[in-house]
Every structure is written in C-alpha cells, then in structure tokens.
Image (cartoon, grey):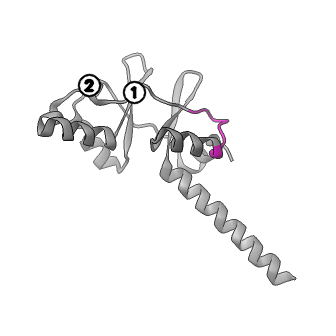
Amino acid sequence: MNVEQLLGDKGREVISVQPHRTLAEVISTLTERRIGAVAVMGADGALVGILSERDIIRALGEHGAAALESAVSRVMTSKVVTCRYQTSVDELMELMTSGRFRHVPVVESGRVVGIVSIGDVVKHRVAAIEAESRAMRDYIAMA
C-alpha cells in the first residue's frame, strides 16, 4: 500500500495556518479539529513549516504561558520532511521512525495534498495484520 491509498481511506483534508498566527489560535484549531499538527503555509500557498503539539509543548516549556502569544513562525518546524503519493507505507514508517516525528505532509506538484499521521499508519498496519490473521484462520479451518 502507498500513501495515496492511505489518504483515500482517511481523507485528504489539509488544515493549515499562516505563519503570523499565534500559538493560542493554533491550539484552538487543533482542539476543535481533534488533530495533532497543522501545515504552515505562506501567502503564496507554499509549505513553510509544520506545527505539532510537540512544538507547542517545547515552546511552553521554554517560555511559559508567554509562548501562547508567539507567532507560529517562531515555534514551527521549518525543515519539513514530506512524502509523495507513491511513497510506500513501509517507507513512510521508516521515515517517521528515523526522524522521530508523527506527522508527514504529502506533497504533489508543489502542493500539500494531505497529511499522514503515525495513527493513520498504525491503523493501516493493524487492519492488515487482522486481515492476515483472518485469512490464516480461514485457511486452517478449511484444511
């Protein structure tokens, strides 16, 4: 399975914010949408960063409550690792594991077309293992 198929199952909606927004505003968005990260997009629609719950916690730990008024651009991860539709789920798992991050934007033709989380990958892996287990049980029952 590849990322395109994964997005087909989970959806392709991309929640994004502008770099000048405050952390408090983004926290509100994350809470309302029940998500763990947002893409940070420049005025031209280009991906300039990603802001995750982990980035926010780090900022709060370093600066206390004052961090809530900080611009996203001061806290976001600007060196964003991305993937493409054709990236396999196995490659994506390796990318997430080695990079120690939980959200990867999917970019095609210079546009962000989705964001895949570690939860999406785990959900897929569990479903695949369950399907394999069912197939094995069915095979054994027929023997």
Residue 59 visible from this viewpoint: yes
Q: Which mark is residue 75?
A: none
Give the x, y percent position of residue 109: 59, 22
| Label located before the other in sequence (1 or 2) | 1
Residue at left offset 48%, top offset 53%: 119
Give the x, y percent position of residue 137: 75, 78
The kind of residue tagged 2 is Arg
Location of mark 2 (residue): 74
> Looking at the figure, which quarter contains the C terminus?
bottom right
The kind of residue tagged 1 is Gly
Q: Is residue 84 left or right of residue 69?
A: right
Dot 1 falls on a residue whose secondary structure is: strand
In this figure, what is the number of numbered marks? Answer: 2
Q: CA distance from mark 1 to mark 2?
A: 10 Å
Q: Which residues are magenta?
A: 83-90
Q: Main secondary structure of the magenta part?
A: loop
Q: Contact (CB < 8 A) between labels 1 and 2?
A: no
Q: Closer to the camera, 76 or 40?
A: 76
Residue at left offset 82%, top offset 76%: 139
